[in-house]
Amino acid sequence: MKKLRKALTIIFIIGIIAVTVWYFLKVPSLKIAPEKIIENYKKENYSGVVVEKYIDDQQHGYHKVILMEKDEERTILLDDDISGLFNYIKKGDSLEKSSGSLRVKLKRRNLDTLITMKFFGQTSN
């Protein structure tokens, strides 16, 4: 019985190692380099009024902000931002962001401020 238990333990450990190695070698990385994430956010350009804000439990917990831009709704994802922008935004706020920048201009009744988006692994703006 001890030999069987020892053999099963060894097989289990080898299996775990094999699956781990296979995963890291064969499965495409789910993480994007921080520089790529930052570049993607910098490319975005939007200006509109927040009509809705929520965490989408049906879609991997994405942090979504729905903006009304001219006569169209647009979804902005703020998953990777760690500045707290998503938590700060309220329905009715105006948001404006220019391409090439990480600064978001937020306006509400008695507030007009710039918030700079921040990301894990960020070395510069």
Image (tube, helix red, strand yellow):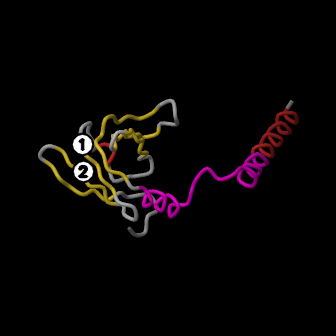
Q: Quadrant of the N terminus?
A: top right
- State the residue in front, 2 or 14: 14
Q: Is residue 71 above or below residue 17?
A: above
Counting from the top left corner in percent of width and height, residue 116 is at 31, 59
Q: Amino acid at mark 2?
A: Leu
Q: Are marks 2 and 1 in contact (CB under 8 Å)?
A: yes
Inspect the image, locate mark 1, and give the three-letter code of the amino acid beneath it: Asp
How crowded pointer 1 is (Cα within 10 Å; few <14, some 14-19, many 20+) is rated as: many
Which residue is located at x 33 percent, y 34 percent?
Answer: 52
**Image coordinates for residue 115, horizontal then vertical, percent:** 27, 56
Helix, strand or loop for disc 2: strand
The extreme left residue here reads 110
Q: Quadrant of residue 104?
A: bottom left
CA gap between label 2 and label 1 equals: 7 Å
State whether residue 21 is above or below residue 63: below
Side (left or right) of 4 relative to 74: right
Tell me which label, 2 or 1, sits earlier in the chain. 1
x and y percentages locating residue 77 in the rendered image: 43, 45
Q: Position of residue 118 (x, y in %)?
A: 37, 58
**Residue located beneath label 1 in the image:** 93
- How many discs mark residues in the rendered view? 2
Q: What's the magenta region?
A: 17-44
Helix, strand or loop at mark 1: loop
Which one is in front, 12 or 95?
95
Quarter of the figure with residue 75: top left
State the residue position of label 2.
106
Q: Main secondary structure of the magenta part?
A: helix
- In the depicted structure, whether residue 76 falls above or below residue 124: above
